[in-house]
Image: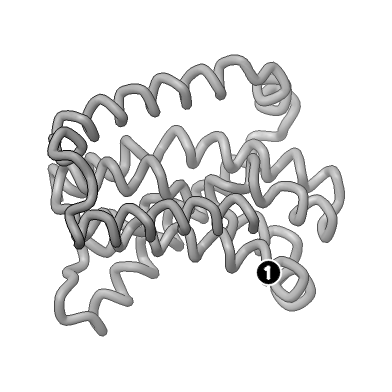
Amino acid sequence: MKGSLVILAFFTVGLIGGIYSVFPDWLLNEDLTTYALFVLMFLVGISIGSDKNAFYVLRKLNFKVVLVPLTVVVGSLVGTSLISILLSDINAKEAMAVGAGFGYYSLSSIFIGQMHSQELGVIALLSNIFREIITLLAVPILVKYFGKLAGIATGGATAMDTTLPIIVKYTGKEYGIIAIFSGIILTILVPVLVTMILEFL
């Protein structure tokens, strides 16, 4: 929760500073966000590649566990496309691109901002931050009424890191392994699916 609030606070400061033009012009250079994206992708690759436990989890789990991230993907994309019907300014493709962030707000918002528009990038940022915060707050209720996989599903990509402690607390260590696996797969899929949705749909 604290990490999400800190990121939201930085976003708010940047937004206010941009509105009132308090930052130097070089910060407004669009190439800067492109370079930031390259660095972020590099760091994500290092993070996943250096996590030996992640590869151990992949070898250990039954093939059926693949259904967990697959269900999260299908549920997120179908859900956001249906929600778009109620929104006048966002079509199904844009809503699905936001949903394909799976809680990974930093990466998805930069991708969407670069490939579509800054406005949709902001929506992706806020939407995915809220997904993480809701997971942190609602896991006990979700587990009680919808089963132990519900907390993993709502956590999306964050189930491998920021929301993992709360998931393990209310589901057990064996589900923690499933959460890590699902989070890794979804993290890898974020740039792939966002790109495919925005470029080919």
* Residue found farthest to the bottom: 86
Q: Residue at x 65, y 41 (%)?
A: 161
Q: Quadrant of the N terminus?
A: bottom right
Q: Is residue 75 left or right of residue 1?
A: left
Determine the residue positioned at 17% across, 54% down: 21
Instruction: Identify the residue at image location x=84%, y=55%.
Output: 169
Q: Is residue 93 visible?
A: no
Could you say where residue 45 lies in the image, as x and y percent from the top left? 47, 21
Residue 98 in picture, x, y percent from top left: 32, 57
Against 57, residue 4 (above or below) is: below
Residue 200: quarter of image: top left
Mark 1 residue type? Leu
Q: Is residue 143 left or right of residue 82?
A: right
Q: Residue at x 36, y 65 (%)?
A: 78
Residue 109 position within the rendered picture, expressed as x and y whole percent measured from the top left: 32, 48
Q: Secondary structure at mark 1?
A: helix
Instruction: Report x, y in % for residue 5.
Output: 55, 58
Q: Which residue is mark 1?
A: 137
Q: Residues within 10 Å of mark 1 (few under 14, many from 20)?
A: few
The answer to whether residue 44 is visible is yes
Relative placement, left or right, of 141 versus 105 is right
